[in-house]
Amino acid sequence: MEQKNSQTASRWTTTEVATMALVTGLYVAVTVFLAVISFGAIQIRLSEMFNYLSLYNKKYIISVTLGVALANLASPLGLIDVVVGSVSTLIVLLINYQVTKRVKNMKIKMVITALIFAFSMFTVAGQLTFFYQAPFFFNWAIIALGELVSMAVGGVIIYWVSKKIDLTK
């Protein structure tokens, strides 16, 4: 009986799964709607704002990772970007979770998250270098800058939303 209760306790509720699916869908919708600026050497992927949700509840690590995988189906690199992008996102979200979990101030957590994600754009630069012979360091700098802009704008939005909606659920 005890084992059954511990298994039940670790499952997500229908509401939690629906919320996670909503976040995944929003990530995809924002990315695809803004596809012209979401892919390529110069990108400002505003859907990256959803990375901040993992600061409020770690279940969103899965939602955002799935969102990246699905959104990257629209990428010019196709399945390569699906695999590399989603695996990279998962790893960076897990690292970010570990780095920020003891930080109490949400604004500081958000700054750390923005910097970690901007730095992580070497994966995108690497893909562009490999497939298009684009200059790695230049692309990394440009894509990291775009990520920083995305995260800054998104950080303000998510922080404001968090004041109106409990994102820990």
Image: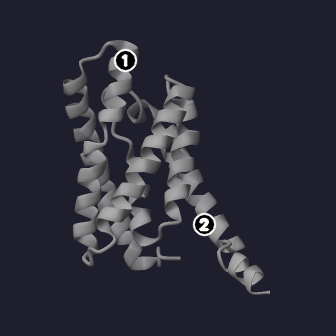
Q: Measure the C-alpha gap from mark 1 to mark 2.
A: 37 Å
The residue to which callout 2 is attached is 19
Q: Residue at x 80, y 87 (%)?
A: 1
Question: Outermost residue, right direction?
Answer: 1
The residue to which callout 1 is attached is 130
Tell which tag, 1 or 2, sits nearer the viewer. 1
Q: Residue 10, relative to residue 99: is it above or below?
A: below
Q: Nearer the viewer, residue 132 or 27?
A: 132
Circle 2 residues within 10 Å: few <14, some 14–19, many ≥20: some
Q: Residue at x 24, y 70 (%)?
A: 107
Label 2: which secondary element: helix
Residue 3 position within the rendered picture, expressed as x and y whole percent measured from the top left: 74, 81
- Amino acid bearing label 1: Phe
Quarter location, residue 88? top left
Label 1: which secondary element: helix
Residue 163 position within the rendered picture, expressed as x and y whole percent measured from the top left: 37, 78
Residue 43 position within the rendered picture, expressed as x and y whole percent measured from the top left: 34, 34
Q: Nearer the viewer, residue 150 or 109?
A: 109
Quarter location, residue 157? bottom left
Number of the label disc, if any, that sits on residue 91: none
Q: Residue at x 67, y 80 (%)?
A: 9
Q: Residue 140, relative to residue 24: is it above or below?
A: above
Q: Residue 28, relative to residue 38: is it above or below?
A: below
Residue 92 position within the rendered picture, expressed as x and y whole percent measured from the top left: 38, 50
Q: Residue at x 26, y 74 (%)?
A: 103
Badge count: 2
Q: Nearer the viewer, residue 81 or 143?
A: 81
Q: How is the image coloured?
A: one colour
- Amino acid bearing label 2: Thr
Circle 1 residues within 10 Å: few <14, some 14–19, many ≥20: few
